[in-house]
Image: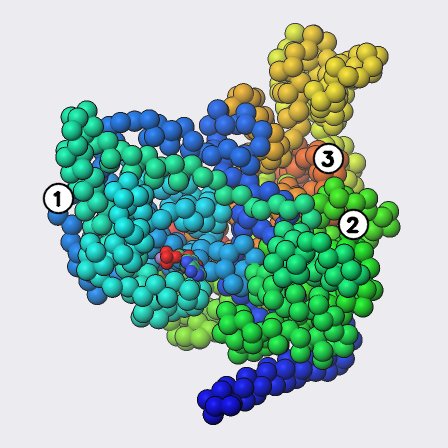
Amino acid sequence: MEVKEKAKIVITVASLVAVTVLFVTEYRRRRRHRRKQTSSLSSCYLHSEVRPQFGFKRVLADNSYSEFKHLKLDDASSSTEKASNCHHPYESEITVLLENTKIEFGFLRGECSLKMSDSYVWVEMESQLKKLAEVLAKEKVFAVDTEQHSLRSFLGFTALVQISTHEEDFLVDTIALHDAMSILRPVFSDPNICKVFHGADNDVLWLQRDFHIYVVNMFDTAKACEVLSKPQRSLAYLLEAVCGVATNKLLQREDWRQRPLSKEMVQYARTDAHYLLYIADALTAELKQLATDSSSPDDTFHFLLEASRRSNMTCLQLYTKEIEDFPGSAAASSIIYRHLNGHGDTSTIALNAEELVRKICAWRDLMARIHDESMRYVLPDQAVVALACKQPTTTEEIYGTIAHTDLATESSPSLSSSVQSPYPVICSHLDDIYHMILNKLAKLDDILPVVLKKCLGTNGTCPISVFNYSLLLNFKTKLSSHSAPKQNGHKNFKQFTRKASRELFVKKFSCKAPVYHNCRIYANDGRLLCYCDKRKLEWYLNRGLAKLVEEDPPAIMLLFEPKGRPEDEGNDFYIQTKRNICVGCGEGKHYLRYRIIPSCYRVHFPEHLKSHRSHDIVLLCVDCHEVAHAAAERYKKQIATEFGIPLFVRRVIDSKEAQGTSSLTEDESMVNSEDAGVSPLHLRSAAMALLRHGNRMPSSRREELLQIVKMYYGGRDISEDDLERALLIGLSPHERRRRERKQGVSLKHSAEVARLDKQENGKKDENNDGEGPADSEKIMNVERSTVADDSGDGGTSEGDGAAELNDAQCNGNTLHQQNSKLSLLGHGPHGKQIVEYLLREYGEDGVRDFCQRWRKVFVDAVHPRHLPGGWNVSHSGRRDFGEFSVYNPTKRLSTE
Ligand code: AMP
Ligand code: MN
Ligand code: ZN
């Protein structure tokens, strides 16, 4: 044997040993680690790994088995479209381009610079992205390329978008800006702006998948090559042939998630987009030339148009998620076919191996979805084959088998990026493999529910994320379409989706940053006046009313003498440091804001009494929040009885129809006409039943339901339109909007909605984020709230971006009782009427008393152990600073 070969063998054996040792050590380490812990909560590697995509707030294509939903435009024509799964939102715009023979090719600007300067723009902030959108909106043409990451992601995600104009190269950090990318939607779908790509098939789909960005009007230089019958169509070839530029295409396989990008990667990324305008220019010139060379004058532009037509055909593609008959079945079949001679061999051994391949592939599919990893990162095909054939039975043997295939295949992830552990999913969840091989997880159908429950169920081993959450929700339907699920499975299922709900709820709604900044304000004699947030400090600093005396945490000294001191009145609340913990139990990991005085009353307080926010908004963990909220709901009912002002609208009658019979105003007809009308809930369910099943139900039942609806409309005959209108009665504006979104009824009844909105007595529009919430959010019946508080002046709102729940979310306990009847009712005019009554009868003291009652309710329910010192039930309610504060410098000046 030659020395060289001997050396080769030695190296191979040595590395095999090394990898096996690595595996086994890692496994032992984990096992030790796990034994120490009583729960298996931290056994999954994801608990200690930060993944960039877990920072995404909204994911359009999650890892569930449900179909991808395309953008649905709000115009009338598409609102009638039932599902948007298979409809291109810009189909008509693109069709126009395909048929139009007079397209302008805006990128033909005569001269195009080849030079790539040293500078480029790195876009990573929303403000920068907005500026970019403005720049692009003014262009006639720009070039685009994208890079995506696929190894550590189930579906892959766009990690970078490169955009070049004639003047500048922009690199858009689409990881940092993932949730803001819709800002670029309009320029991409603008048919008057041409987007130049090279080989756009993937880019077009990735942009749809990640950002709902649809390209309308494209020139694909690869298509131009096709039409020109160029010998090669790669970008590398064009760069070389047209621009004389060399590029290293190996860089396309780099990990594009890394930040900052290496110099080489920046150069590569820019190169992919920068020269495209120049290349497009050159190729269109060739296409035109080809046209003039050809015999018939009618053919002018023929080639150019053909290239353009083929490009825009690419835009018509729609992204879809691959949906299999059974999870992993396609991969399993392919593996069996390629590696197990899966045709004909019916020996028990062969059948056994096949069965194991199917199990492992199903398991791998689910694992990849749960952990948001690619299949190849979970377990490469080669390893599936090896496990199925060797069927190792000890954990060490399992590792050895995988490690062995690992060496055989070069492109496996563990060798290229295995600083920590090779195949962490396997390491974390080795038991499953073990059980599958030992045939303890006997049936294929059983594997998925068992594994899903183990990973994401109550005390599940793996973290819940926006990617895997809806797996829980869709899973049942996915499976039941293949096999009849067992009854007891369902009950547990409910339980563990509930737990998952809570976890995601905490994640979504708890405050992302500390609420209290604990900045300090000193008087000019050095005495501490109060603790407050940064904004308040800035308010004084910007007006030259204070100077900064300390940096971290910041403190300012007022340059004027405030009128009175907090401690003068024995109120030291405002000089307490407020801690970022739940005031109920002290939980510090998550908390959300809780309003002690329910918004339905507080919004109707006179402006100057609304102000003691920092006192009456406290931090609570989700559990204490639930307790407090439930107590508040109970107390509202008590208030309703006590004041004789019902919490919910009891009976409604249509104001127009009622006009003939009574002289009530709209408001009155909503509440007071006890004997006329119908309860909103009754009305809506009757109308819904009639709309859905009207022509199928027994006529007696139909008549019964019709009577209910007629009661609302004053007894007249009912049209289908009336029924639809009835569906919105008694809903809060927020609920109505949600219902409209769900049903796509919109323009038809907008007048009605506007009328109802007006009736809502100035109730605040607290939920308007412009877009419908992501699916998972919809299912949980929660939406992101923006703090709808009026804190215009140097005000008292503490901490931006802090979370709280608004009334609509709280109604009916959003956590668990989705679509409960309670949540459908809304509070109507109750809050307003109570506050008006208090003011009328007792003046402002009535409101102050009322607040004290609510504080007592809160204390009795939660027994808070961590309220800041100085907090008390009988707090005077005077605002500390701000417009109505006695300390307000402007007020002080004006009253003196
Ligand atoms: P490009 O525009 O050619 O740089 O490719 C865009 C993206 O496609 C890259 O960021 C990769 O994610 C992916 N890609 C293209 N070709 C390959 C390849 N041969 N191997 C792996 N990934 C590729
Ligand atoms: Mn590229
Ligand atoms: Zn896990």
Horizontal side of residue 561 vs 812, given as left or right? left
CA gap, disc 2 to disc 3?
Answer: 31 Å
Residue type (three-letter) at the residue carrying disc 3 = Leu
Q: Is residue 419 above or below residue 454?
A: below
In this view, the residue in front, 444 or 580, is 444
Count of numbered labels shown in the rendering = 3
Query: Foreground mark, 1 or 2?
Result: 1
Q: Which residue is mark 2?
A: 494
Residue 336 picture location, percent across and down:
66, 57
Q: Which residue is mark 1?
A: 110
In this view, the residue in front, 718 or 893, is 718
In this view, the residue in front, 593 or 887, is 593
Residue sticking out furthest to the left: 111
Q: Earlier in the sequence, mark 1 or mark 2?
A: 1
Quadrant location of ligand 1? bottom left
Would residue 106 be visible to someone looking at this image?
Answer: yes
Q: Is residue 691 above or below residue 2?
A: above
Query: Foreground mark, 1 or 3?
Result: 1
Residue 214 picture location, percent across and down:
41, 41
Quick one: label 3, few (<14), some, or many (20+) residues within 10 Å? many
Report the residue at 85% width, 48% height from top: 486
Q: Which residue is mark 3?
A: 647
Report the residue at 38% width, 62% height from top: 252
Residue 418 picture location, percent across and down:
54, 76
Residue type (three-letter) at the residue carrying disc 1 = Gly
Q: Earlier in the sequence, mark 2 or mark 3?
A: 2
Residue 538 picture location, percent across and down:
39, 62
Residue at disc 1, secondary structure: loop
Horizontal side of residue 856 vs 369, given as left or right? right
| Residue 859 figure quarter | bottom right
